[in-house]
Image: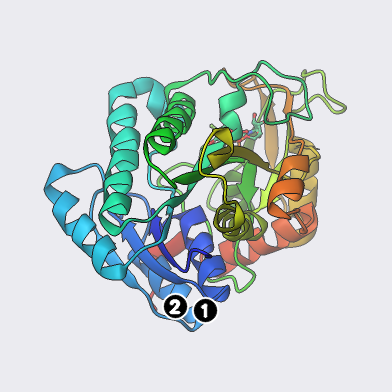
Amino acid sequence: MMAQRVVVAGGAGYIGSHVCVALLDAGRDVLVIDDFSNGSPIALDRIREVTGRDFETVAADLASQADRARIEDAARAFAADGAVLLAGLKAVGESVEEPLRYYETNFGAAAGLLHAMAAADAKALVFSSSATVYGDLNASPVSETAKIGAVNPYGRTKQFIEEILRDHARATPGFGVVNLRYFNPVGAHESGRLGEDPNGVPNNLFPYIAQTAVGRRDKLHVFGNDYPTPDGTGVRDYIHVVDLARGHVNALDYLARTPADTADDRVVDVNLGVGAGASVLEAIAAFKRASNRDVPFEVVARRPGDVAEIYADPARAKALLGWTAEKTLDEMCADHWAWQRDNPDGYGDASD
Ligand code: UFG
């Protein structure tokens, strides 16, 4: 049976809000659990607006013992039969400064959600893992059988949570997991009503480009142009967040139709990427075309920890989930720009 009633942990965040839309548009019911430490309650209203559907929310911290009973009661009352785990901290640099906070928060969120699922007897889980688990050990395209070796605490929380989920699935009859290893999610909902609203100065390329194009930042720093890539700048697999979100619905459907109750195929690792790379300079050029704005930039030193190039082999997503990315880099830029233009301060300036 398909998971019809899905707990979305971290549903008010950038990716979570788009996952909620994909699930609601596919006719599923949703229960959001979020502590709003990074996500916004306004995003939840916008999800209702673009889908025309309502859903319940529990404002709670999955890692908190004090909130646990309330979360478990809510999952049970909702009669959850599936879940998506997106809740967690996600800034690489911050994780190097405060590793303990990253481990406590991200492991705590995973454990809290597993307890809530047990309370409701829900057995299908999709986890927001990351291509960061591949570290810098592999040539691209990277398939799921590549070597694993995250290079910072944030990445190691993703890597270790994959292992925690493997252990939990082995110990729990009927429990199935898809670890979705995201490449670089960008873009926004086509309505322009939902998008990425990073706290403070953005760490990632697209929000930084977008804030530069809209005039909130003076210029973009391009981290190195002496990599062994065609134009010397870093190459990544940018994937539209709406394509990515759709992959979560496919992953839940995969778990529902995969009967095996033993062995490793109850936990599968699946890349979500387009399967091709774009350089920093190509991303800037595409964003300029989409926005018709200038994006001033300056080339500076490489950022420690960056790899020259990484992009996905997305064959398994197609074979197992029936999923392929559909949207182009130009569409990613157009949708990211429409969101940034209409919401220059993210949800912070939203009056409705
Ligand atoms: N870049 C710049 N200037 C910026 C920001 C980024 O030139 O201001 C470059 C980077 O050097 C890299 C590319 O743009 O070549 C993409 O950088 P992002 O920070 O957007 O993305 P990353 O690939 O570094 O990060 C992604 C995920 C993280 C994950 C990381 C691990 O966003 O969650 O992969 O590799 F941890």
Quick check: 273 above or below 153?
below
Q: Residue at x 74, y 34 (%)?
A: 311
Q: Position of residue 351 (x, y in %)?
A: 38, 76
Q: Residue at x 53, y 67 (%)?
A: 23
So how many labels did they put on this image? 2
Label 2 SS: helix
What amino acid is labelled 2 in the image? Arg
Quick check: 57 above or below 315?
below
Question: What residue is disc 2 on?
Answer: 48
Label 1 SS: helix
Q: Position of residue 104 (x, y in %)?
A: 27, 31
Q: Residue furthest left?
A: 66
Dots 2 and 1: beta carbons under 8 Å?
yes
Q: Position of residue 85 (x, y in %)?
A: 42, 48
Q: Which mark is residue 51?
A: 1
Q: Nearer the viewer, residue 179 or 254?
A: 254
Q: Residue at x 48, y 32 (%)?
A: 162
What amino acid is labelled 1 in the image? Thr
Left or right, 182 with respect to 276, comes to left
- The answer to whether residue 12 shows anywhere in this view is no
Q: Residue at x 38, y 39 (%)?
A: 89
